[in-house]
Structures are given as structure tokens and as C-alpha cells.
Amino acid sequence: MKKTIFLFLALFAFITSNSQNTKYTIREYENAIKKQTRSLDGNPGINYFSNYSDYKIEAEFDTKTGLLTGKETVIYHNQSPDTLQIIVIRLYQNLFAKGFPRDFTVNSEDLTDGVIISKLVINGKEINIRNTRTNSTNMFVPIPDKILPDSETELLIEWQLSYPEHTTVRNGKYMENVWFIGYWYPQIAVYDDVFGWDNSTYTGSTEFYNDHSNFDVKITVPYPNLLWATGEQQNIDDVYTKKYANRIKDAKNNENVVNIITPDDYEQGKILINKDKNTWHFIASKVPDFSFATSDKHNWDGVGLELPNHSNKVFISGVYLDTTKFFHNLAKISKDIIKTYSFKLPGILFPYPKMTVFQGGGGMEYPMMVNESSNNDICDDYYVTAHEIAHSYFPFLVGSSESKYAWMDEGLITYFPRLVVDILQPQCISCKKVQENYSRDANGFYDLPLIMPTNVFKDFWAYRVIAYNKSSFALQQLNKYLGDSLFFGGLQEYAKRWGNKHPYPWDFFNTFDDYTGENLCWFWNAYFFEFNYPDLSISEAKYKKDLTIIIKNIGGLPIPIELEIELTDGQIISYKEKADCWKDENIHKIVIQANAKPKNIKITGNNPDTDIKNNFLSF
């Protein structure tokens, strides 16, 4: 609690002196501006860099025991101007290691020894693991000869880990021989121009921050399990019998859904060539992560979608249990969602050559893969599917830090996918959830400025409000103010500038200011840097020849004014004003011509308001 109070006071100290025409900027970002790796107009600076890795991985996964063993060769490309003394390796499955920190209680049977590194070689020199330091999910490794600027470093790592069988956190075991596997290989952390090495620990709540890397992966699982993964499969003809290899190829090129694997196919037992073990080979380029799913009972439907940024059709798969009502249309629904994203909202072409939506559990995104459960409710399941697929744009294409500023992906992805759901399923009225969810939190204990780093929160609901609820409302209000053309145009420009790069919040703010040609500090400050909440009040009203109304913004959050005025002659006047009416002061005067005396005035609209008692005035 003391830490929380300190954060409140420290944040309040700097925001109260902040001008409406400028944004508070952290020292680390200001230094990046000075180094010209970032720029004040929202573009990457002339000295911008981003590092990446080439992963070549061979792994075997035992679907009975959850044991995963692997070896990888990693070529790390240091494109920075800096000489690196250490390298940071992420070992995410240390989340389940005995004695390591986590944000929740796990089944005692799932506690493990974490990730066991049996061999680590850097540039041909074997590293004694005792000379490394592990802090939760990060391993800090001194480099024998340092990593020079514009150089490559080769790492050889051999490891093993045991996946939990009872606790599922974004992935895991969902039934016998059914697994979704993520965060499974030793991964090089991000080294960027703002903070240097990202040493955020993974404790279960906040998510990830990864480089855009290249993967060449071979995964072996026992018969009769099938496997789906990030990337494009390279050895279809070596794994599947001719009948099913042809079905997969047909589905890839077919605009109509093809049933690739059905319950009858499993029963016949002629899907795979090898009856012992099978190795799947996948290649993926410029993706921030790699995941896979495996099952011996899931249906598989596939369909192709032609997009102008791909030489071949995008291959879209729905992989689901036959007993699930909604997911029998999963491939078609996923195709409709991706097509709408590409050509309507947000109007950014889907960046990857494939997408597989797998019925496992919860709702979690990975590059070219989605892990989700079904509620057999069309609106809920449509939204979860749309939400997770939309992460392909943010934070996968646009590689922001989910751990530090989760609103940059979750806020966006809690907002515009709801617009797309309402396009495809108008009866869902999904967008109303944006207002409803923030209404619960407004002016409450967790209603904090959005710029607060999300990795400081150990309270799940505090994280939820910042990452999802308040941020999606803020972005909805920005959309209302700017209109679709400027808002989605700004989002497209942001994706164009920061695709396959690592933006921070100020890059987002500055891009929108630059694209719209407007200083939006009055908006950024109110939602992201200050303690404000939605509460408009009808302060007073007078009628002479005209009707004069004084509206007070008690909460300070800039939201539109929407009034309904009933006159004594029965006439109803609707009045609207955009949120920028609050950019200079929190008292606003409205003058309306009225041919009769007013009977009553009320604040209307769908915006949250923490005190509705002052939203009505009767004469």
C-alpha cells in the first residue's frame, strides 16, 4: 500500500504543473530524442535501430508427460551503436519454478525446477552456468568477448522443461493429448534505444516485449498427434499421407472452407505417414514469437484469403473440438474478421501468411496463432476471436512493450475489434461494452493515469483497468473527436512508421499530432497523465431571448457534450459539442436559440458519468 501511495503522489507532483500544450516526457525518452533515435514528429529518428535474432530450433514434446527438450542455435544481430557486456535470455517457464515470484497460486503438483539449461555456448566458447545470474524469468549472461556494434553473436543452447498439467496460464494442457505451448524456448530479450536491455520479469499478469525475429523450427511429437504452429509448414508431404496433404493444399488455395480433418478421419487412422513419431517443420520471418498446438482429436478446417500484400493466399484455419457448436464456423468467421480488418477497419492489410485459431482455453494471442475457449455464445466468441486475431497488428506488427505500456496493444484491441464485430454481427452491439466496462471503474481506486507502467501493478484489477477498460474508452473518445477518417488514418500511419519496430507512448502521441496537424496535448494529458474522471454537470440555465446553459466538467475528463432540451411547446432540441470544448477550461457556456421557454434540460449520450444526479435541470 505504501508503494501505491508513493506512486500516486509522485505522479501527481509532475502532472499538476503540466501545461495543456506540452506532454510530460520521461528522461529515458528525452535522451532518445537527443540521440536522434526518436523524433518529435512521431517518426523513427535517423539513428533508430532495432535488434533481432535468427532462431534455428529442434525440439521434442511428450504429449503424455509434458516434457519438452530442445536445442537451438541463435544468431543475435546487434544493430545498435552500443557495445554490449551481457546478454539477457528469457526463461519464461521459470514462472512455475519453486520459490520464484508469480502473481497467483498454482497447483502444487505443477511446481517444477523451471527451465534447465544443460549447455550454453557463445561464439564457440562454453559458458559455465554458475557464472550467470538468474532473476526469476531472466538470465543475465556475461559475454566473453563483448558484443560489438553492428555485429552478430552465435549462441547454442540446450534445455529442457516440464509443462504444468493442472494450471493453464495463457497456454498448457486442456485435455488428454491436447496442448497449446507458448513461451517454451530460451529467448533473447529486447535491447532498445530507450531502456537498453528489457529486464522486466514475467510473473503471470503483464505480458511481453519481443524483437521481430526469424524462426526455423522442427518439433517432434508422438503419433497420432497433429501439430499446428507459427509460420508456414515446410514438410507437408513428409508428414501427411497424400490424401490429407492434398486437402491442406486445396484449403490454402480455396476461397471456400475445406474440411481438412474430421472425426471420421481420426477414426480411420490414415492421416499421418509415420506411426511412431512425426516431426513438423515451420519457417516464420519477422515475428516476435513462436508457439504451437498439438492434438489427436481436433477438427481442422481451412480456407484461403487473397490479399494484395501476399503472393499466395493467406491460409486461415479453425481447429476445434467437434462438440463445440460455434466453432464449426471458425475458419469462415476468422476469414471474415481478417478481411474486414484489411479493407475496412483499421484498414491495415493483414501482415502474415497464415492464421490458426485453436480451441484450447482462455483467450491468448501469438503470431499466426490464437488459443481460445468457446462459451457457445456467438457474440462473446466472435469478440474473443476478433480480439486475439487483431493482436497480429498490435503488438506483433507494431512491436510495443506489453509489459511496460499494455494499453498500446490491449486498449486498441479492446476497442476497434468491437467495431468490427458490430459490422459482422450487428445484433451483438459489442461497442457498448467499452462504456459499460469503464463505467464500473470511473473515479474509483484504480482509475489512474494511463501512462503509469503496467508492470508496476501486482493487483490484477489495477492492471485490467489501465490495460483494457480505461484505455479502450480513451481511444474510443479520440475516435469520436477525430472521426473515422483521421483516427484510422492516424492508426494506419502509426503502423506504417512503426511496423517491425518498437514504439513507446510518445511515438503514438506524436504520430497522431503530426498526422492530424493538431496539438492534441489537451486530450493526451487529460487521459494519460492526469487524475480525471467523467462527470459533467448542468450548472445553471437562463432563458431570455436565447437559452444560455452553463455546463461544468467536474471530473475534468474531456468527453462530448450531448444535451436534450424539452421546450414548453413540446419541441425537443438535441445539441452536441465535441470534446475539445474542454481544451482550455472546465466551464463551458452554450447559447441556443429557442422559440419557447425550456421545460427541462438533460445530459444524454452513452458516456460514463459518475454522478448522474446533476445531469438534469427542470424549470
Image (cartoon, grey):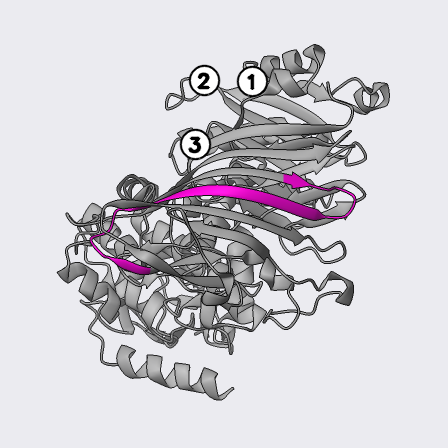
Does dot 3 land on a helix, a strand or a loop?
Answer: loop
Circle 3: is it few (<14), some (14-19), or many (20+) Cα within 10 Å? Answer: many
As helix, strand or loop, the secondary structure at mark 1 comes to helix
Magenta: main secondary structure: strand
506 shown above or below 244:
below
Q: Name above or below for residue 343 compared with residue 572.
A: above
Q: Nearer the viewer, residue 264 or 129?
A: 129
Q: Nearer the viewer, residue 516 or 140?
A: 140
Image coords of residue 614 (percent x, y): 46, 76
| Place of residue 406 in the rendered image (x, y in percent of width and height, measured from the top left) | 44, 59
Q: Earlier in the sequence, mark 1 or mark 2?
A: 1
Please give the range of residues in magenta.
60-85
Badge 1 or badge 3: first in the primary sequence = 1
Q: Position of residue 33 (x, y in %)?
A: 17, 60
Query: Which residue matches tag 1?
Result: 252
- Where 242 falls versus 498 (above or below)? above
How far is the residue under mark 1 from the one under mark 2?
9 Å
- Is 612 one of the magenta-colored residues? no
Which residue is pictured at 38% across the width and 34% down the height? Answer: 347
Query: Which mark is on residue 312?
Result: 2
